[in-house]
Image (cartoon, rainbow, N blue to C red):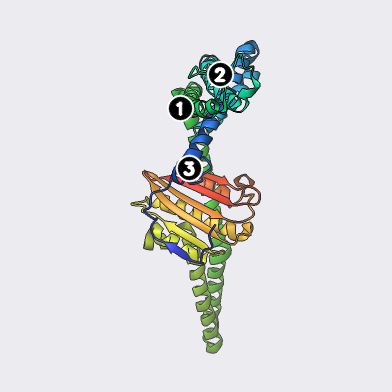
Amino acid sequence: MPAWAPGTYSGASEGRSRPRTTDEGEPVHGVIGEARARLVQTGRSGRYLLGTLMTATVTLVAAPLLCVPSLAAPWVERHHRRAGAVLGRPVEPRPRALRRDLAWLVTQVATGLPAGILALLCLGNLLLTLVVTVGWWAFPTSDPPRLLLLDVRINSWASALTINLAQLLLLAALGAIALPPLARVHARCCLAVLAPSPAEQLAARVTELTRTRTDVLQAHGAELRRIERDLHDGTQARLVAIAIRLAVAGESLPQDPDAAAALVRQAQAETEEAMAELRSVIRTIYPPVLADQGLVGALGTLADRAGVPTRIAIGDLGEVPAAVEAVAYFAVTEALANIARHSRATEAAVHVTRNGPMLSAEIIDDGTGGADASRGSGLDGIRRRAAALDGTMKISSPPGGPTTITVELPCV
C-alpha cells in the first residue's frame, strides 16, 4: 500500500477506466501482457477440461458407488467449487439433494467426456508437435514423422523449424480460441444442474430472513440494554446527585447562604457534565454528523479521528437512505476502531462506492491479519447490522495481513 498522510480525504473517485487484469488482479499491459494473459487462461482451461475428463471417467466407472448419498455429496461439491473457480464466481455450500446430485453425475459423463477428449486432442497434438520439432532426427529415415494437421513429412531442420512452427502456432491459436469458452460452457452447465430450485431458494431465503430477524432483535435488545446502562450508571446517577445537592442547598440557604451557593455551583457543574454524557449517548444512537453533513461529510471526519493514518476515498453515492447511511458509518467507525486497537497497522484506507443499488464500503489495513467475525467481536456487530438491511460483510484477513473488510448494502 502506498504511504498516505494522516487525514487524507478524497471526495470523489477517479474517473479513469480500469485496465484489464488477470485472474490474480494483475494489470495487463500491451500485446505481450495480453498474450501472456491469454496463455495463462488457456492453460487453466485446458487443465480444467483434462481434470473433467478424468473425473467424468471416474464417475462413469464408479457410478454405482456414487449413487450412495454420503459418497456423492462430497464428490459433487468438489466439482461444484471447481466450476465456480473457472468462472471466477464464489459458490455457496449447497443443501444436499440426492436427485440433483444424480442429475449432475449424468451431466458430468455426458458433457465432460466429449469436452475433455477435445481438450486432450488439442493439447496432445500441441505436445506432439513440440516433440517432433526437437526430435524429428530420432525417427527412422524410412519413416519420418508426419504432421497431423498439414500432412507433411518432417525430414530436415528446415521443415521442422518452419512447417512445425506453423502447426504449433495453429494449434496454439485453436486452443486459445476453443478451450476457454469450452471450459466456461461446461462449468455453467454444471452450476445450472446444481442450482437450487425456486422452492429451495425460497426456503433458504426464509431461513436467512428468520436468522437476520433474530440477529436484529438481539442487536436491538443489546443496544437498548447498553443505552439503559449508560443512562442508569452515568446520567441518572449525576441527576440524582444534582437533586440531592439542590435539596441540601435549599435547606441550608437560610442558615448558611455561602455553603448553599457552593452547592448550587457544584450542581451546575454536574448538570453540564450530565448533559455532555447525555449527548454522548444520543450520538451513539444516530450520529448528529450524519444528519448535519450526510454520509460523505461524516466519513470525511473519520480520517482525522482514526487511530492510524487513514485515507478515505468516496465516489458519487447519490441519494442514500438514512438507515443505510447509519449502518455504513457504523461499519467504517467500528472497523477503524478495531484497526487501531488490534491490527498493529501503520496505515489504512476506506473506499466507499455506489454500483447501481448497492453501496460498498471497503476498509483495508496493512496490519497483522487474523481478523475473525466469529469470535463475537465488533466485526460480528457489523455483520449483523448489514444483514438487518439484507446486506453482506466479507473479510479477507490471512495471517500476516493485509486485512480487507467489504460491506455491501442495498439502497432500495
Q: In the image as oriented, which residue stretches furthest toward the top?
A: 64
Q: Position of residue 144 (x, y in %)?
A: 59, 17
Q: Residue shown at 39%/55% (left/top)? A: 14
Q: Sort mark 1 into few (<14), some (14-19) or many (20+) by Cα contacts within 10 Å.
A: few
Instruction: From the viewer's side, name the closer residue of 165 and 245.
Output: 165
Residue at which label 3 appears: 32
Residue at which label 1 appears: 181
Instruction: From the viewer's side, name the closer residue of 226 and 186.
Output: 186
Residue 245 appears in the picture as rendered: yes
Which labelled disc corresponds to residue 101?
2
Q: Sort mark 2 into few (<14), some (14-19) or many (20+) by Cα contacts within 10 Å.
A: many
Q: Position of residue 196 (x, y in %)?
A: 49, 24
Q: Are marks 2 and 1 in contact (CB under 8 Å)?
A: no
Circle 1 or circle 3, nearest the eye: 3
Q: Position of residue 338 (x, y in %)?
A: 59, 56
Kind of residue indicated by mark 2: Asp
Q: Residue shown at 49%/32% (left/top)? A: 87
Disc on the earlier residue, 1 or 3: 3
> At numbered mark 3, what does the secondary structure look like: helix, strand or loop?
helix
Kind of residue indicated by mark 3: Ile
> At numbered mark 1, what does the secondary structure look like: helix, strand or loop?
helix
Disc on the earlier residue, 2 or 3: 3
Q: Quadrant of the N terminus?
A: bottom right
Against 287, residue 215 (above or below) is above
The CA span between labels 2 and 3 is 43 Å
Q: Sort mark 3 into few (<14), some (14-19) or many (20+) by Cα contacts within 10 Å.
A: few
Against 179, residue 309 (above or below) is below
The CA span between labels 2 and 1 is 24 Å
Q: Is residue 12 left or right of residue 135?
A: left
Q: Position of residue 62 (x, y in %)?
A: 64, 13
The CA span between labels 1 and 3 is 22 Å
> At numbered mark 2, what does the secondary structure look like: helix, strand or loop?
helix
